[in-house]
Amino acid sequence: MIRPEEITEIIRRQIEGYIPKADIAEVGNVLQVGDGIARVYGLSNAMSGELLEFPNGVRGLALNLEHDNVGCVLMGEDRLVKEGDIVRRTGRVLDVPVGDELTGRVVNPLGLPLDGKGPVKTSSSRPLEVVAPGIVERQPVKVPLQTGLKAVDAIIPIGRGQRELIIGDRQTGKTAIALDTIINQKDAPPDKRVICVYVAIGQKQSTVAQVVKTLSDHGAMEYTIVVAACASEPASMLYMAPYAGTSMAEYFMWKGRDVLIIYDDLTKHAQSYRQMSLLLRRPPGREAYPGDVFYLHSRLLERACRLSADAGGGSLTALPIIETQANDVSAYIPTNVISITDGQIYLESSLFYSGVRPAVNVGISVSRVGGVAQIKAMRKVAGRLRGDLAQYHDLAAFAQFGSDLDKESRRQLARGDRMTELLKQDQYSPMKAEEQVLSLFAGVNGYLDDVDIARVRPFEAGLLKFARANYAGVLARVREKKEIDDALNTELSALVKEFRAGFK
Amino acid sequence: MKAADRILARRYARAFVAACGGKPRAGVEALAAQRGQLDGVMEYLASPLIPARVKSDILNGRLPAGKGAAAFSLLELLLGVRRFNLLDAVLADAQALCDEREGIVLSRVVSAAPLDRENTAVLKRALERLSGAQVRLETAEDAALIGGFTARVADTLVDASARGAAERLKKQISGGAY
């Protein structure tokens, strides 16, 4: 703790040692300002993306370099800037503070704290925008990132370094999937734990506060950074937020750590960029978005990767979120992000309201990395699950006509009903991989076929409790070996049969 | 002035300099002289409430000898298109264009105390070295600078004032940027 006298002494020394000299700067004058945009006359050597200094501590980003003026977005209140004000070049691009000190903090896109826990004392910074690692610096995605959700880990596995889109209408549980994934990283040892970055773009402050509370309540804030650009902030802050979050995440990735970043959501990010572009008088295209809105997201998501061993072996997994209107995935921004990412998790409101939660439509959700990003045990139990569920949905649609079904079809329907029930999971209750394997093992091997549908979830809960109490060694072997050999298969069968015999 | 008006003024200036043929400096000086004779009536000539005929009479009454010259034609044009409020900006831009053609740059120097002849000459030479062009100095005084001076040449601002030094020291002590 520095005493007031020491501060006075430091300032006195600085004043005594200060050598006044002329300051030479390249400057321009504000021509017009409004709506978070300023047009500046002069600054003929300004670079695109350069940080500019306005009076009263306001900063701006040069985006439009035109014939006789520079169009820039302000990162602060535009009422503090007026016509004729002098604008200075800084000669540097925008950067954000990065470091271990950011974990557990809630910051804005400039790295300023929003959580009232005092200043963030970081020692280094990274540029807001950097070129994504090249092919040489990467290695294939093959290590799973467990979300703790059966429906995702079994059918749509996510690998470390992958970009998996979460897409759906409002109130379908998009953020819940992301938060479950963050919470699920808690049990890993601190030095191996996945660092999480949650970027809130254009959300209500109350929503962000709720997210922070949820993460704190589950002990997940200690390894999470929340970057928030809320709805009331200028469009420039919303535009910067995902890039700032990625720069903060990359710091850990280049140190060899695995990092997860969630962009919640990129629809609002695209809208903020549209607002800035229209105010800068850039030509509007489809849905009034500018022509480079694809590049806006592709250059962001391309920064997600798994680095080669030579580059430290770290990874950055991205879970962008897109909000659709009335399940329309053919709108401009959803199709763009679908084409950029390595898979999509589709959430449907009809499933959500019929009680299927997480409301994942397993029929159309995909992961282009596939089984490579699954542990062998999970691949073995979930291998046929997607196909079986697809057949079940077809058959269920046909069975609605009331025609008599043969025995095999009735069996398929019964199995499908039970597997759908088994994939349901409570919010903020991620499951360990070995417990998921045990649950699914019971389901796919038909041990649930004669259990009443309403009793499937109690059966599952009871089975897990029984296994933890009496067969912890079997679960530990699944966790350690990560595959089911014949011996383990027999042990798992015996475990389930024993529980089933006593289940009422 | 609005950004659009500034751009418009530059277009009028460019057209006027072109209309002056081989002697743009003479044309600009004539325009400056005529502008000087309009002091006191500028507000009327720029007002949209005064009928065009009345404005034309005022212009002809003030500048009886100007008719036929490019400068007078420009004044009549600005009056006709109701853009007389741009006159000062057009004149400044036309002077800047002439300066540019002749390799002269305008430098505005603001000092805390009046500059003597010797200091002005030293400053002019220093600014010419900095800009690599011939400098035309415009001087003004501003006690708010406390001491020293500021000089602006094109996009470069040289701040050697006591106020600027104090601001930089403040920034250094407070840790700067964020």
Image (spheres, helix red, strand yellow):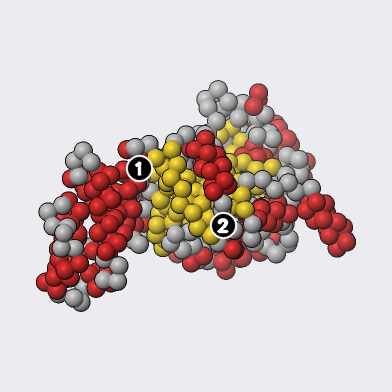
**Is residue A425 something one can see in this rendering?**
no
Cα separation, mark 2 vs mark 1, equals 26 Å
**Residue for point 53% across, 60% down:** B141
Snapshot quadrant of residue A437: top right
Q: Residue at x 39, y 59 (%)?
A: A32
Q: Between A436 and A415, which is closer to the camera in this rendering? A: A436
Q: Nearer the viewer, residue A14 or B145?
A: B145
Question: Mark 1: few, some, or many residues within 10 Å (few <14, many ≥20)?
Answer: some
**Numbered disc 1: what chain?**
B
Q: Quadrant of the N terminus of chain A?
A: bottom right
Residue A159 position in % (x across, y down): 57, 37
Residue A79 percent across, percent down from the top left: 48, 67
Q: Which mark is residue B99?
A: 1
Disc nearer the start of the sequence (2/1)? 1
Which residue position holds label 2?
Answer: B114
Residue at horizontal 59%, vertical 32%?
A: A306
Tag 2 near tag 1, CB within 8 Å: no
Counting from the top left corner in percent of width and height, residue A372 is at 55, 31
